[in-house]
Amino acid sequence: MNFDITFGYPAWLIIICLLIGGGYTAILYYRNNEGIGRKASVALGILRFVVVFFLAVMLLAPMIERLINIEEEPMILFVQDNTGSIGFIPDSAYYINDYSDEVKTFKAELGNDYDVRTYTFGESFNRNDIFTFDEKFTDMSAIFDGLQTLYSNRNVGAVIIASDGIYNRGINPVYASAANKFPLYTIALGDTSAHKDVILADVLHNRVTYLGNKFPLRVHIEARECSGERSTLTITRDNERLFTKAVNFTTGHYFQTVDITLEADQVGMQRYHVSLSPVEDEINLANNYKDIFIEVLDSRQKILLLSNTPHPDVGAIKQSLENNENYEVKSYGINEFDGNVEQFNLVILHQLPSLEHTLPGLMEKLDEHNIPRLFITGSQTNISVFNNLPTGINIKPRSGQFNEALPHTNHNFALFSISREAKDLFGQLPPLYPHFASYETDGSVRTFLYQKIGNVVTEEPLIAFSDHDDTKTGIITGEGIWRWRLHNYLHRQNHIVFDEIISKTIQYLSILEDKSQLRIFSENIFYENEPVKFSAEVYNQSFELINEPELHLTIYNKEGVDYPFVFSRTSNAYVLDAGTFPPGDYTYDADVTVGDDRFKHHGEFSVAPLNIEKLQTIADHQLMHTLAAENDGKLFYSGQWSELIDELKQREDIKPVLYSQKQFEDAISLRGIFFLILLLVTIEWFVRRRSGTY
């Protein structure tokens, strides 16, 4: 070990320290030596000089720099596949009971010469000595990301990966290891034998559908070594059989896709069990079934389309709405309608009220039930009656003529957004035909499109929205919107832009705002390895966001077991991470007390099993061989522990590494200097005391 001394101030100041020490000593001992004797006085002067000099030098902040040599033993990193594919094979008892003991013995023997560290991988790459073989999926590429992060500049002698070579997440581990700089050895686990296996590979489906709709399922079926065998595909819900189909396997490696259509006849979260019956002597039955969850909503918006007389606008709007499964459209001429509007979420009034039909009773019902409405004015509209309605727009015709008004986007409109494609097409659309009039609007009106007359952009609304007494109103001030649909098809060979305009308009008007003071937000479906999370908002009577009250939530399983939780607070809301739950259906109740009022919320969610590890259980030892060969290593099999140890010990590049490291320490913190100064001062004091000078 070498050392050097550096100073926090210029080294020439040491001369000043010498002068301070010499001057102080001379003043003290030049004449003050009575009773001591000349020799003793000189000796004591030297002691005092040394003490004062050292104290002065300490003011220069001296640092002692040491060069230390450190020897780092080579590390062996043992990485174990901890996923379920190993636990499902016929020889799984060996891995669960005996394998872990063999690994412990192997690591203990390696530990005599190397620093052995153990990791597991599956869902993630973690430092872990316990093997459970229950992780839900395999991401082998995560190994190399973890090694690069943790050991890029360390003395790693070798990496040992014990796995069956099956991966179902991330990229191919051979490609992922391209940046690996360590020798890599693999231990091949699992069973490469091909057994009879019927596999329900996947079930493709929508997560949400609507009551009364028919929804599709696409089932992917595989079978290995089952030529000449037969299975049955079955779909059930609550033990009720909904579908069955015989499947005959004609080849050794069989694949088939089955398309199925089911009807959504019950509201709520529906759990469907899809299964394939096993064949004779089939060992792995865990991949023969799958549960899927589909939420059936009874929330299709019912739209009433009323017209004064037949008009192409009505047909264009109806066709657009019927293309959206979220809407159920009923279209009537005003003379055919029975007046029952309570069942509808939105009423579209084309050129109504008119001269013949002022509709006072209908308007009263719409106001009574706060039903949103969309007015389309035109040549048949009774303007005086329209102006008396709470639309926020007052039309004052200047003559009986009509303008040709092109659409111009209001860039400050914020009730909903329109795609760039729609905005680009607005400049090409043909005109609508509003009244030649002045338009007065109140503060509630939000204009979506302005009227552009020729090249002049006016502030007159072409499409606008207002909100009076919590009732939304939309106004299209001109007829002829059917031409927009034709023009859209002429230029784009589709009706996407027109459908977007109609859909966004209807969606804004028909969706009711949530006025509840307790709102809980969560997904409806979680997988068993995902934490169940909630967020929440609580409002006071002024509908201001608050989070002072304590918010409780209790989750119940099918057996009625409850799991109580309390939300954590954020800046102005609430969050809850309830952790993971076993597969099944759950309900929950949330409640909060605000002042004297108590608010409650009820919901439900489902936890789906994650069976991806059960789909493939035939080990891929070729992958393990390639992985080792590409990284300066070799493939070994479980049980060849001694051979692997010998291989590692024969490598000349696995050896200790010597590092040189500088260490800095304040000289003033050294105990030796303190005790030296104390000793010198003590000797001086003792001699002077003995001589009677103190």
Image (cartoon, grey):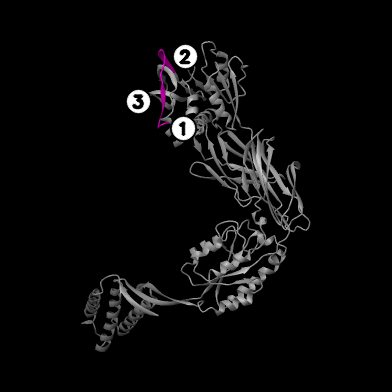
Q: Residue at x 54, y 60 (%)?
A: 142
Of all residues, the one furthest to the top in this rendering is 356
The span from disc 3 to disc 1 (Cα, nearest Å) is 22 Å
Residue stretch rendered in magenta on the structure: 394-417
| Residues packed near mark 2 inside 10 Å, few (<14), some (14 to 19) or many (20 plus) | many
Q: Position of residue 489 (x, y in %)?
A: 50, 31
Eyeballing the image, is 53 above or below 226? below
Q: Position of residue 579 (x, y in %)?
A: 60, 50
The span from disc 3 to disc 2 (Cα, nearest Å) is 27 Å
Q: Which one is in front, 552 or 683?
A: 552
Q: Is residue 397 shown in magenta?
A: yes
User: Is the C terminus in the top left, top right, bottom left or bottom right quadrant?
Assistant: bottom left
Q: Using residue 442 as the reference point, say whether residue 638 is left or right of it.
A: right
Eyeballing the image, is 221 above or below 417? below
Q: Which one is in front, 690 or 560?
A: 560
User: Is the N terminus in the top left, top right, bottom left or bottom right quadrant?
Assistant: bottom left
Instruction: Report the mark closest to the observer, 3 or 1.
Output: 1
Q: Position of residue 320 (x, y in %)?
A: 55, 29
Instruction: Report the mark closest to the observer, 3 or 2.
Output: 3
Amino acid identity at mark 3: Asn
**From where the camera sits, is residue 35 visible?**
no
The span from disc 2 to disc 1 (Cα, nearest Å) is 35 Å
Eyeballing the image, is 678 above or below 98? below
Q: Which one is in front, 509 or 497?
A: 497
Of mark 2 and mark 1, the one earlier in the sequence is 2
Quadrant for residue 129, please give it.
Answer: bottom right
Q: Which mark is residue 455?
A: 3
| Residues packed near mark 3 inside 10 Å, few (<14), some (14 to 19) or many (20 plus) | few
Q: Which mark is residue 491?
A: 1
Residue annotated with mark 2: 383
